[in-house]
């Protein structure tokens, strides 16, 4: 093992140990804030695979979040599944759904793809709302967590570890993609799809696979979110704001890099939380202004600036 | 490569230390600091419920200014000033739950409820887990109180009373007495509970309840539901709705010539000023139930009678209070009375004082059953007459007579 690999492993171990031990140092509300940050790290990283690496701006990403959440809630409530069985099955089901819609939708490009995926998310919300017998409709559905049914609620620290695992999984998958032949293919599609095809990249397969992986990770997060919230409603699970937040995080941090979505999610969530706590009446206005400023000043994202100024040149050296 | 790897290691270690250090537990502000009682309130200051959230905030603010102007809360021989710390939950239940946890971190054990049943439900679960105490000002869905929680007390009448009180009023006052009724309902939990209870009440009074219809919450097109009920010729059409669906029912019923021989009634929407503004004369005759009207009997030492409350509120805000304002002030009042009766801000003692509370107020009776619901308070029934809300039921609050049929206006 080379010295750099050992250093990497040690660095990663220190970060993981720090993150696992973190809840012992935090109050309950702070644990929930960090849990929400980890959830958005995973979501932003998932969007980054299709939107950042591949360059297909999926404005309907929240559909996968909602499908994951509702699949878990329905399996637990109506089929008496445990959460741990429902979690992977929800992700697999959503991956299959993404493959099916990806085949026709990924033939569209640019604005057309964005609008079509937005339509999928809005449509899925209506489907879930109108399947009242299965999903509870607008009244929501409650995941069984008490009375011997379902799986016992994990507690704030338990959900922290669950979302930490999912964030780690998302970052790990993105890292593997970034350094693989498949990832280079996605970047090629991003830069010039026709040229990528001419160079031998099976663009249809690569794009559909990217969307499928992205959807599966998003569905895992949606599934965990449904269990954490206990009662879920279609308005929230298919809320377009969630997609917008993912995209803003990726753009602010740096699209098409692994570190960018992490920086974007952590930065935006903490700034948002700080503003909400200190400026309860004006926080959304101020946050909007901050986002506009960051996008104007750093069009290639915060990691892009850091890389160019030599502050974190390792980001570029390691293609992160 | 060799020179960069240690830098990554150091960066990782620093990040871990920073994260671990940022949350190091320190001294937090307790519920009572010096001469102040701090209450926490997660509120819809933005998002889909912003309008109602800000009305609720006004109600809480009026409570704070009145309590402090009258010398504060007497606790153990001292007078404590009242302070409410607001945080914006953006009308999202998950955020409301997170904010109540953060209040607990700060040592705020006494909580005033957010706006709406969904956010209240999320907050209730956290309050129970943390050993906090909450007075709910607007979460009316009965199902919230089936979860076995013992630390939340709701000052408002539960959802099951909203339509049932309208049915009672029509049955008592309408001449000729209607024989058939139908319920149209939005599909959110609150509206479904309201409609189910209204149907049960109508059946118990011997009315023929025609098959009801549901549509998605927030729907602005209810024409298919209206078309389906038209052939049954219902004499009374009751909408279990919020503002958007309520306006759609009246507007589209006129377009489709769905005219009941008795009248229309709706929950929640008609007392909202936008209802009359949008519908104009079409709003006349529509019945509704209200958590509070200025004719409510009862008074208390802080706010006086309901009329005193209206006058005082008008002086401070330049407008008459509506029931969202009043129920918020009443929730704050219940908390203040409980702290006073407990002689302490200890959450356990305040919870017990709330469970024992039995007081009259400008809002009516404040007394909770063992589920935490205020079941002794009645709801009032109002009718829009010449663009104004007129209380018509119960008899001891009536400011005018019921105009019946209500569809002739």
Image (cartoon, coloured by chain):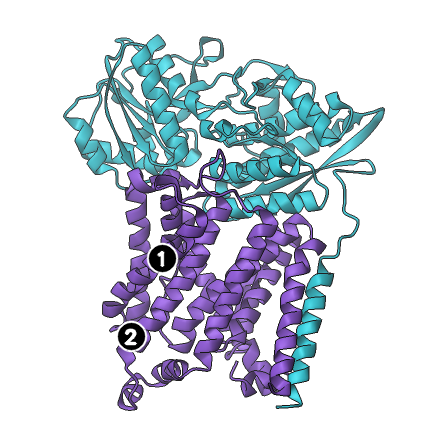
Which residue is at 71% across, 66% downward?
A: B18
Q: CA distance from mark 2 to mark 1?
A: 19 Å
Q: Marks 1 and 2: in contact by CB < 8 Å?
A: no
Residue A303 percent across, percent down from the top left: 56, 78
Q: Between B141 and B82, which is closer to the camera in this rendering?
A: B141
Question: Is B253 placed left or right of B188 in the picture?
Answer: left
Q: Chain of mark 2?
A: A
The residue carrying mark 1 is A63
Residue B329 percent across, percent down from the top left: 61, 29
Question: Is B99 placed left or right of A191 in the picture?
Answer: right
Question: Which quadrant would residue B247 be assigned to in this image?
Answer: top left
Q: Quadrant of the N terminus of chain A?
A: bottom right
Q: Chain of mark 1?
A: A
Q: Which hue belongs to chain A? A: purple
Which residue is at 64% across, 69% downward?
A: A15
The residue carrying mark 2 is A109
Identify the mark nearer the N-term, 2 or 1: 1
The numbered mark at residue A5 is none
Residue A220 percent across, percent down from the top left: 43, 58
Q: Which hue belongs to chain B? A: cyan
Which residue is at 59% across, 14% downward?
A: B298
Mark 2 Cα shell of 10 Å, populated few (<14), some (14-19), many (≥20):
some
């Amino acid at each position: 093992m080379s010295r750099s690999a050992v250093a990497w492993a040690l660095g990663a171990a220190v970060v993981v140990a720090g993150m696992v031990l973190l809840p012992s140092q935090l109050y309950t509300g702070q644990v929930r804030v960090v849990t929400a940050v980890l959830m958005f790290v995973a979501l932003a990283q998932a969007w980054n695979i299709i939107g950042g690496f591949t360059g297909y701006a999926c404005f309907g990403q929240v559909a996968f979040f909602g499908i994951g959440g509702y699949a878990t809630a329905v399996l637990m409530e109506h089929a008496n599944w445990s959460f741990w069985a429902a979690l992977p099955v929800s992700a697999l089901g959503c991956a299959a759904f993404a493959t099916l819609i990806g085949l026709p939708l990924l033939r569209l490009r640019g604005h057309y793809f964005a609008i079509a995926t937005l339509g999928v998310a809005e449509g899925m919300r209506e489907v879930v709302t109108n399947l009242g017998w299965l999903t509870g409709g607008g009244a929501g559905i409650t995941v069984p967590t008490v009375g011997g049914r379902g799986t016992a609620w994990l507690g704030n620290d338990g959900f922290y570890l669950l979302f930490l695992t999912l964030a780690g999984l998302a970052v790990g998958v993105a890292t593997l993609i970034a350094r693989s032949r498949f990832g280079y293919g996605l970047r090629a599609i991003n830069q010039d799809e026709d040229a990528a095809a001419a160079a031998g990249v099976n663009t249809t397969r690569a794009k559909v696979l990217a969307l499928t992986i992205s959807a599966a990770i998003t569905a895992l997060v949606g599934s965990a979110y449904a269990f954490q919230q206990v009662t879920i409603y279609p308005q929230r699970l298919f809320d377009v704001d969630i997609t917008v937040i993912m995209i803003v995080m990726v753009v602010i941090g740096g699209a098409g890099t692994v570190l960018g979505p992490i920086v974007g999610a952590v930065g935006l969530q903490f700034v948002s939380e700080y503003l909400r706590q200190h400026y309860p009446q004006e926080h959304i206005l101020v946050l909007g202004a901050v986002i506009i400023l960051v996008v104007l000043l750093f069009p290639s994202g915060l990691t892009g600036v850091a890389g160019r100024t030599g502050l974190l040149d390792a980001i570029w050296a390691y293609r992160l | 490569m060799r020179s960069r790897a240690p830098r990554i290691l150091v960066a990782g270690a620093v990040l871990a230390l920073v994260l671990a250090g940022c949350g190091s537990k320190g001294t937090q502000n307790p519920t009572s600091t010096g001469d102040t009682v701090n209450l926490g309130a997660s509120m819809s200051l933005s998002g889909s419920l912003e309008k109602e959230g800000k009305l609720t905030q006004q109600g809480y603010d009026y409570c704070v200014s009145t309590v402090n102007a009258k010398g504060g809360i007497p606790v153990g021989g001292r007078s404590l000033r009242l302070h409410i710390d607001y945080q914006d939950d953006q009308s999202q239940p998950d955020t409301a739950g997170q904010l109540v946890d953060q209040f607990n971190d700060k040592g705020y054990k006494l909580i005033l409820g957010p706006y709406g049943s969904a956010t209240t439900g999320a907050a209730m679960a956290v309050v129970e887990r943390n050993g906090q105490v909450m007075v709910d000002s607007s979460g009316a869905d009965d199902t919230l109180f089936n979860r076995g929680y013992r630390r939340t007390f709701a000052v408002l009448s539960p959802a099951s009373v909203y339509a049932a009180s309208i049915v009672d009023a029509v049955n008592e006052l309408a001449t000729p007495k209607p024989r058939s009724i139908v319920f149209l309902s939005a599909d959110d939990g609150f509206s479904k509970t309201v409609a189910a209870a209204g149907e049960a009440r109508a059946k118990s009074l011997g009315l023929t309840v025609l098959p009801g219809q549901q549509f998605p919450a927030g729907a602005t097109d209810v024409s298919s539901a209206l078309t389906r009920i038209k052939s049954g010729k219902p004499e009374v059409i009751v909408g279990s709705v919020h503002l958007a669906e309520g306006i759609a029912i009246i507007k589209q019923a006129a377009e489709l010539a769905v005219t009941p021989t008795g009248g229309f009634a709706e929950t929640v929407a008609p007392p909202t000023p936008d209802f009359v503004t949008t519908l104009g004369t079409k709003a006349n005759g529509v019945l509704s139930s209200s958590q509070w009207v200025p004719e409510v009997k009862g008074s208390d030492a802080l706010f006086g009678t309901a009329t005193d409350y209206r006058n005082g509120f008008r002086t401070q805000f330049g407008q008459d209070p509506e029931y969202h304002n009043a129920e918020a002030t009443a929730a704050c009042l219940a908390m203040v009375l409980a702290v006073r009766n407990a002689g302490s801000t200890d959450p356990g003692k305040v919870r017990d004082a709330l469970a024992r509370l039995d007081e009259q107020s400008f809002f009516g009776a404040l007394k909770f059953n063992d589920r935490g619901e205020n079941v002794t308070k009645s709801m009032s029934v109002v009718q829009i007459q010449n663009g104004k809300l007129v209380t018509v039921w119960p008899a001891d609050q009536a400011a005018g007579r019921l105009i019946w049929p209500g569809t002739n206006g």
